[in-house]
């Protein structure tokens, strides 16, 4: 049986084009492709009727089918491109960066309170014309002791609670910043005016006022005609620079192997203004010890290449933790080393 009625597929094409135009996303579009062009789809069903046509009918239907495929295929490709463009545009919109938004706040860091105080102290001396010098924390016994007139059986050698690196005292963790005095004098001509910030180490047990690691600022001035009056004036300027113009300093006799004469230096109490009350900080004395000082011992000048008949000098060593605790009313030195941010944020 040959049926020459070639099916009219124009209606099907209109339905297909309408479905494609209506497809709202790529899934719906794929669904339309399967429905009309798929192996088991509408066009395939029509194609199966080929066998029942005569030659002319087949040719005619073949041409229509090809036209259908071209037209519907082109519509599918167009629609796919349009949907992909829309999807990309939607994604761009969704992921748009709003550059007008304020940035998330990163809390700014700041130097540790001990570093702040160290810088303040150094700034005072730099303001007076001092240079900054530094030396090693692992130091030879020669610099830490011998050149400073601390000889092998001097009691200070034991009193200093040295932490040793080698079995004898050839190599130690420096017990003070004073060895840098020797390093500077050995390498520089007069006039010398240096301050030496740095860490020092002593075999001390930790408590509210002791730490095996602490910080000093050494000062050294050597020139012709330097006197104790220069030392006193310098220390007064330092104390006032750090604690304010109203403070005074007082020197009490003391003893260091590397200075002669030597002094413990007190600053007047800024907490009670010396009214003699039961002040927690100065214990009612009105004075607080903040450093050791003295005139550079002639032996030290000589050991370090300077003629004690030609030049003289003074030196001092400031305890930075102590100054920081006084300045900021910190009761326990351990606060300065424990890195508790709740504490550190106060400064
Ligand atoms: N080096 C002494 C100490 O650590 C301090 C000091 C320095 C004293 C300079 C006098 C002169 O205790």
Image (tube, rainbow, N blue to C red):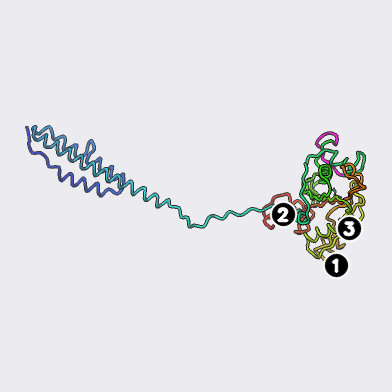
Q: Nearer the viewer, mark 3 or mark 2?
A: 3
Q: Position of residue 106 (x, y in %)?
A: 58, 53
**Disc 3 target residue:** 229
Q: Quadrant of the C terminus?
A: bottom right
Q: Is residue 47 above or below residue 79?
A: above
Q: Nearer the viewer, residue 38 or 59?
A: 59
In front here: 261 or 110?
261
Nearest to the observer: residue 212 or residue 67? 67
| C-alpha separation, residue under disc 1 versus residue under disc 2 | 30 Å
Q: How many marks?
A: 3
How much space separates mark 3 and mark 2, taking CA atoms?
A: 29 Å
Where is 231 relative to 53, above or below? Answer: below
- The magenta stretch is 160-169
What residue is at 89 percent from the left and 55 percent from the top?
228
In magenta segment, residue 176: no
| Up-down relation of residue 280 to residue 60 (above or below) | below
Across and down, in percent, residue 192 comes to 82, 49
Q: Secondary structure at mark 1?
A: loop
Element carrying mark 3: helix
Q: CA distance from mark 1 to mark 3?
A: 28 Å
Q: Measuring from the top left, give residue 153's x and y in whole percent.
A: 92, 39
The numbered mark at residue 116 is: 2
């Amino acid at each position: 049986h040959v049926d020459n009625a070639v099916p009219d597929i124009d209606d099907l094409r209109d339905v297909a084009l309408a479905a494609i135009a209506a497809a709202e996303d790529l899934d719906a579009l794929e669904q339309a492709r399967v429905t009309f062009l798929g192996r088991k789809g509408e066009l395939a069903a029509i194609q199966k009727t080929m066998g029942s046509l005569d030659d002319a009918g087949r040719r005619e239907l073949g041409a229509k089918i090809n036209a259908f495929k071209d037209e519907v295929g082109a519509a599918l490709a167009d629609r796919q491109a349009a949907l992909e463009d829309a999807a990309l545009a939607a994604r761009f919109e969704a992921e748009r960066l709003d550059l007008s938004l304020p940035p998330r706040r990163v809390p700014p860091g700041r130097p540790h309170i001990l570093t702040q105080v160290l810088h303040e102290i150094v700034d005072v001396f730099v303001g007076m014309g001092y240079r900054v010098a530094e030396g090693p924390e692992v130091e030879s016994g020669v610099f830490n002791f011998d050149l400073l007139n601390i000889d092998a059986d001097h009691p200070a050698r034991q009193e200093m609670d040295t932490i040793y690196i080698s079995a004898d005292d050839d190599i130690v963790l420096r017990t003070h910043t004073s060895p840098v005095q020797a390093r500077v004098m050995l390498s520089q001509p007069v006039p010398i005016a240096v301050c030496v910030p740095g860490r020092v180490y002593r075999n001390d047990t930790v408590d509210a006022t002791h730490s095996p690691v602490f910080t000093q600022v050494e000062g050294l001035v050597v020139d012709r005609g330097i006197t104790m009056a220069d030392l006193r004036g310098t220390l007064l300027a330092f104390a006032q620079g750090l604690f304010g113009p109203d403070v005074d300093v007082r020197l009490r006799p003391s003893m260091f192997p590397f200075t002669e004469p030597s002094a413990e230096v007190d600053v007047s109490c800024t907490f009670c203004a010396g009214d003699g009350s039961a002040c927690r900080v100065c214990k009612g004395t009105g004075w607080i010890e903040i450093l050791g000082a003295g005139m550079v011992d002639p032996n030290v000048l000589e050991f370090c290449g300077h003629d004690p008949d030609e030049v003289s000098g003074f030196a001092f060593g400031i305890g930075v933790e102590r100054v920081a605790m006084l300045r900021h009313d910190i009761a326990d030195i351990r606060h300065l080393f424990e890195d508790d941010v709740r504490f550190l944020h106060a400064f």
